[in-house]
Every structure is written in C-alpha cells, then in structure tokens.
Amino acid sequence: MNWLVTLLLVSGVFFFAIGTIGILRLPDFYSRLHAAGKCDTLAATLAVSAIALYNLHDLSFASILVSWKVFFIVFFIFMASPTATHAITKAALIVGVEPWQRKGARK
C-alpha cells in the first residue's frame, strides 16, 4: 500500500510541475489554461487519491468513512475543474481574447 501511495503522490507532484511549466512556457491564454486545466485536474486527483488510500492504512470504520469522503472530493475535482476551465475559456472568447497565431502563418 505504501508503494502505491508513494507512486500516486510522486505522479501528482510530477503533473503539477508539468502544468506549472506549461503555464510559464506556453504563448497565450488559451494554451496556458489548457495546460492548467488538464495537468492540475490529473495531479489533484492523483494526490488526493493517495491521501485517501493512505488513510486506509488503519482499517477501521472511521478511516473507511473518511476515505469515502475524500474520494467524493476527488470526484468533485474531476468533474468541476474541467467544467470551470471550459467556462473561463468561453468567457474569454466572448470578451474578445484573441488566440495566439504564429507570425507569418498561412491562412
């Protein structure tokens, strides 16, 4: 169980780092938001799942109940984060934020 928790936590931190690099390196609002939405959703899901599994180390009714609640939080993050990213992107498009285009690109 400890190996699985460690793997999930390390994977979560890795995807948080990749998302942060994407936010810093990508050229425009839409691609940065894409990196943040995808990587942060996966990273948070992995990290919080690791917390829920680690809580099951001591198998009692209370720890099982807490782990179920944490898995509901994981489900909420998994559903709400992409929805929020989509809403922010749509609002930016309505306001008039232009997507990045490469200079000299053919149309």
Image (cartoon, rainbow, N blue to C red):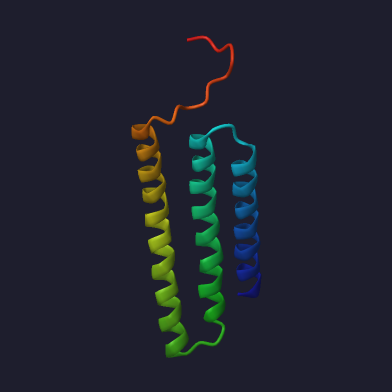
Choose top left, top right, bottom left or bottom right for residue 62: bottom left
Q: Residue at x 41, y 76 (%)?
A: 68
**Quarter of the N terminus within the rendering:** bottom right
**Is 62 or 37 nearer to us in this picture?**
37
Front in this rendered view, residue 66 or 7: 66
- Counting every numbered tag in the picture gives 0
Of residue 87 and residue 42, the one placed in the foreground of this image is 87
Compared with 76, 29 (above or below) is: above
Residue sticking out furthest to the front: 95
Residue at point 42% right, 46% down? 85
Q: Position of residue 71 (x, y in %)?
A: 43, 70
Q: Quadrant of residue 66 in the image? A: bottom left
Q: Residue at x 60, y 54 (%)?
A: 16
* x then y, percent, for residue 3: 66, 70
The percent position of residue 53, horizontal first and vertical second, equals: 53, 74
Q: Please, is residue 99 above or below residue 35 in the view? A: above
Give percent across and percent down for residue 35. Answer: 54, 43
